[in-house]
Image: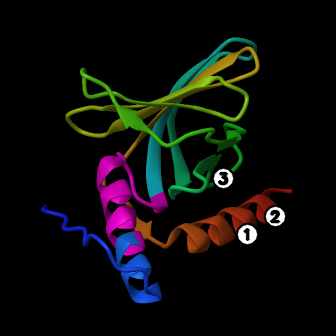
Amino acid sequence: MLLFVSCGGTTKDSNADSAVVNEEAFSASQPVESGIYDATRYDIQGPNARKGKFDGRVIFTISPEQSAFYVYENGNRTKIDYKVILGKPFEQGDSGIYRSVDVKGLPVTIVPDSADYVLNFEKGETKVAIGFDKKPRNTYSAVEAIERMNEQIQKKK
């Protein structure tokens, strides 16, 4: 995809056009888009270690200003319920792995696999790996994804 940026001009329209181009470039650089993804497996290491398959979801909200994700189970058998706010956007490394950190400075990665993606993150002493589908179940704007995330968090309370 080629992106064109106009130079010069100080009108609101030219600034809005630049913002759209910047938003598109940002979205293209991220491993996922804002939306809901099916989560299929988990591997949790640390206290209460466990691994297996589950019917879960990952909601991502991805934007230059703020990115976050929420991992939860569709039922309540595995008690998986993790909320993470990213401290910076994902950056793709030489190995194809996308890296970021959460607001506490802990590492967050998305590893592209042949069949799906693996989301790795830490919560306290616990290391979590979640396998999820590459294609989203639904896509949303970043704001809509935050709204969906908040709705789901309220349901889980």
Tell which residue pokes out farthest to the right in this image: 157
At x 51% / y 58%, what residue is drawn?
63
Q: Amino acid at mark 1?
A: Glu
Q: CA distance from mark 3 to mark 2?
A: 14 Å
Disc 2, disc 1: CB below 8 Å? yes
Disc 1, SS: helix
Q: Position of residue 153 (x, y in %)?
A: 76, 59
Task: Locate residue 134 relative to residue 131 in the image: left or right.
Answer: left
Range of magenta residues: 19-36
Number of numbered labels in the structure image: 3
Vertical side of 47 occupied by 112: above or below: below
Q: CA distance from mark 3 to mark 1?
A: 15 Å
Vertical side of 57 occupied by 6: above or below: below
Q: Earlier in the sequence, mark 3 or mark 2?
A: 3
Disc 3, disc 1: CB below 8 Å? no
Q: Residues within 10 Å of mark 3 (few under 14, many from 20)?
A: few
Residue 58's tag is: none
At x 31% / y 73%, what residue is drawn?
8
Q: What secondary structure predominates along the stretch shown in magenta?
A: helix
At x 79% / y 57%, what residue is drawn?
156
Q: Amino acid at mark 2?
A: Gln
Residue 154's tag is: 2
Q: Position of residue 32 (x, y in %)?
A: 38, 51
At x 61% / y 54%, what residue is drawn?
66
Residue 75's tag is: 3
| Quarter residue 82 falls in | top right
Q: Mark 1 highlights which residue?
A: 151
Vertical side of 53 occupied by 136: above or below: below
